[in-house]
Image (spheres, rainbow, N blue to C red):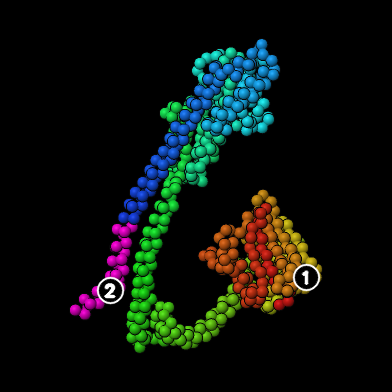
Amino acid sequence: MKNARRNMGYPVVQILRKTLWTAIPVVIIFVFISGYSFWEIRRQNSLSLENAVNIYQTDLSHRLDAIAHFVQWTVVHDPILDSFSRDKHMGDFRQAGNDLRLRVSDMQYSTGSEYMYFFYWDEGDIFINASELTVNYETYKKIKKKVIEDVEKADNSDGFSWIPSVIDGKTYLYYSITYKHRTFVSLVSIDDILAPLFNIKLGSHGNIQFLSLDGNKYYQSGQSPEGLLKYYYNTQIFPGEEASLPFTLVIDSDMLGNYGKIFMLQFLVFLATLALSFIMGGYILVTYKKVILPIKIFSSNLSKMDSLSDSDVGALDLTDSRMQELNQINDQFKSLIHEITRLRINIYEAELDQNKFRIHFLQQQIKPHFYLNCLTTIDSMISLGDTLAAQKMLQFTSKYFRYLFQADKDFVPLSSEIAHTEDYLDIQMLRLSEDIDYSCDIDEKDMDIMIPPLLLITFVENIIKYAEPAGESLKISITGKDYVKNNEDYIEICIKDNGQGFPAEVLEKIGKGEYLTTDDGSHIGISNCIRRLKLLYEDRFDFYLENDNNGGGVVKLGLPKSH
């Protein structure tokens, strides 16, 4: 019975489980309702736009028919235009023009002042505007030119209709009738024609396209939706033939339109409800994890303390909770144990690091392979009878190892380190029979600065070992420049070569402040140098590895002039 009770879930877990199982069907129902609402709102919005455009098309069709009838009747039957004949005088023409304008003004009262009218009598070369102009003078001249050209091309057929026409870069609907050398024209811009539709909310990327009956696009109010936006916009086509209009409309509109805010409000209300449910479930879960479980762990760990050793007690957490009461006991207990172990570990690690450093430093100094290679080279030179080269080799080698075995101080003059580096390069050029293009550009006043011994030689040896210049001799340059950091004088020593540069993994590790640990021991000297600098300068030094844009590796050492 006891085991059965222990395996039973806590009531809070059962409540959380039921909450989650309840949330699943709620989410499914929400997705279904949201999808149906989206579809219905989209359908209603499309139907609303369709009804508005149908009303607009019907009204416009009646208006265009009325204007076309007015133009036909005026040019064929209106006695006002009879004054424009060869046997009349200019005064009669002027009076007839005024009478025509009054007649047009009455027509504009019912059809709209945006429709302009023009009259042209080709026999008398008379062209007048029969209505108030809504265009500038340059556009007026181009309208006049088009009317005259159309009259010259006309065949006096009865197939007259409204046609789209582009005049001075702007699209117009154009209706013209010529009868007995008298031409009457009505003209209206597409912007004025479509003005009632601009009041419809089509969305930020909605637009209206104006197409002729044969499919040519003459006008577009804005850029069509692109990318994912085109799936959010409806494209509806309203053929002109079905509405007895001389043009077809293509309208891109927001799927949700005026109903979008209602849909978003519904969506946000449900999300708020769902979020509240999850917050309640999360609060129950947090209460279980942060209160019930910590108390259980605390009680269990207390019962184990008598059976643990001192080291195990120090690593033991009585609780992992954020409860203040439990953490105070846990922190006080751990602080006592950690303080004792920290003192022991710090002393041990300090001695261990010091011993490791001494071992690496001695290994860096002795270099038995390099010593044997130098002796072998001297022996070969003597065997070949090249005593002069052997003498030079012996001289450089003795200077090199004399400095090496005497470098038992923490700091030496920069001039001594430069001289040691040059001795090393002389040995390598004699031993390998290869020229090395070496240069040193450091101000004479900086040569007395004290730096750690065997510091520069580490990076020069690294160049000799790994640098592989492409098709040219190896180049090594050492430069120095002064700078100020934290109100303290520094010198930056830059060592550069023309090889292939440092590998990417080396630059990445150094950039992250990690030491280089490789199985083959490559670049281990760089890590040793960083350790030495930290021991000697703590955080008062700068160290950078990088690759030059023109090729080659670059090492930059920033050292304080006063140690």
Q: Amino acid at mark 1?
A: Asp
Q: Nearest the camera: 453 or 297?
A: 297
Instruction: Classify residue 136 as left or right of residue 155.
Output: right
Q: Which residue is mark 1?
A: 446
Look at the numbered discs 1 and 2 and tell me whether their residues touch, using CB distance below 8 Å: no
User: Magenta segment, which residues?
Assistant: 1-27
Q: Secondary structure at mark 1?
A: helix
Q: Nearer the viewer, residue 61 or 452?
A: 61
Name the quadrant containing residue 510: bottom right
Q: Nearer the viewer, residue 244 or 101?
A: 101
The percent coordinates of residue 55 (x first, y second) are 44, 36
Q: Is residue 415 left or right of residue 372?
A: right
Residue 399: image quadrant is bottom right
Judge depth for marks 1 and 2 and give the one in front.
Answer: 2
Number of marks in the rendered image: 2
- Evaluate whether residue 226 shows in this view: no
| Residue density around tag 2, few if under 14, some if 14–19, many if 20 or more, within 10 Å | few
Tell me where residue 11 appears, x and y as whole percent.
28, 73
User: Looking at the image, is 555 positioned above or below residue 73?
Assistant: below
Where 384 falls versus 256 (above or below)? below
Residue 376 in the image: state x and y as whole percent. 65, 64
The residue where tag 2 is placed is 11
On whether residue 5 falls in the magenta region, the answer is yes
State yes or no: residue 90 in magenta.
no
Q: Where does the C terminus fall, quadrant-wise? A: bottom right
The residue at 63%/76% (across/down) is 538
